[in-house]
Amino acid sequence: MGPGSGSAARQRSERRIEVHLPMHVRGRDACGATFEEDTSSENLCRGGAAFLTRFDMAIGSDLEIRIPFSNYAARRGDADFSTSGRVIHVRDAASLGERLVGVQFTGPRFPRVFRSESTG
């Protein structure tokens, strides 16, 4: 095991579920320039998420994240989920020019649990 692999295991103590939800992400890229992007989650758990981005982000960067709930949830009175997060891993994605970014929520935890889209 390499350096930091123990902390990565602790950070992923919750099972991530493959679910694609719309996300709005705001922060600073690796060069310090501010950005905003609409994307979608690749996977999610109560304590974090992974998503694709076209921006280069540095590990440790702080982000603001909003996950809008569906029209059905809005009719029930559920508000969009908003939190802050910290980038804990970045790797090149299969699609050219994109990166897969893993974020640990540092603000409120995600209030819902989903069944994986790959099992349905």
Image: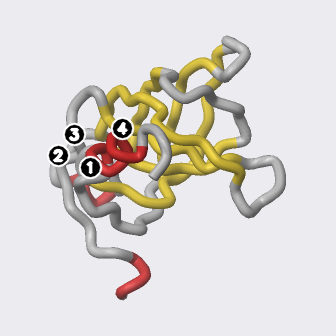
Q: Amino acid at mark 4?
A: Gln
* CB within 8 Å, label 4 to label 2: no
Tell which residue pokes out farthest to the right in this image: 96
Mark 1 or mark 4: which comes first in sequence?
Answer: 1
| Separation (CA) of disc 3 from disc 4 | 9 Å
* Closer mark to the observer between disc 3 and disc 1: 3
Outermost residue on the top side: it is 32
Q: Which of the two labelled residues, at mark 4 and mark 2, occupies the earlier sequence position?
A: 2
Label 1 Cα neighbours within 10 Å, binned few <14 / some 14-19 / many ≥20: few
Is 92 situated above or below 62? below
Mark 1 or 4: in front is 4
Q: Secondary structure at mark 2?
A: loop
Give, as a three-letter code, the residue at label 3: Arg
In the picture, measured across the screen, residue 39 lies left or right of residue 16, that is: right
The residue tagged 1 is 74
> At 60% across and 18% down in the image, what residue appears?
28
User: Do callouts 3 and 1 mark residues in contact (Cβ within 8 Å)?
Assistant: no
Circle 2 packing at 10 Å, graded few (<14), some (14-19), many (20+), is few
> Which image quarter is the C terminus in?
bottom left
Kindly report which numbered mark, 4 or 2, lies closer to the viewer in this rendering.
4
The three-letter code of the residue at mark 2 reads Gly
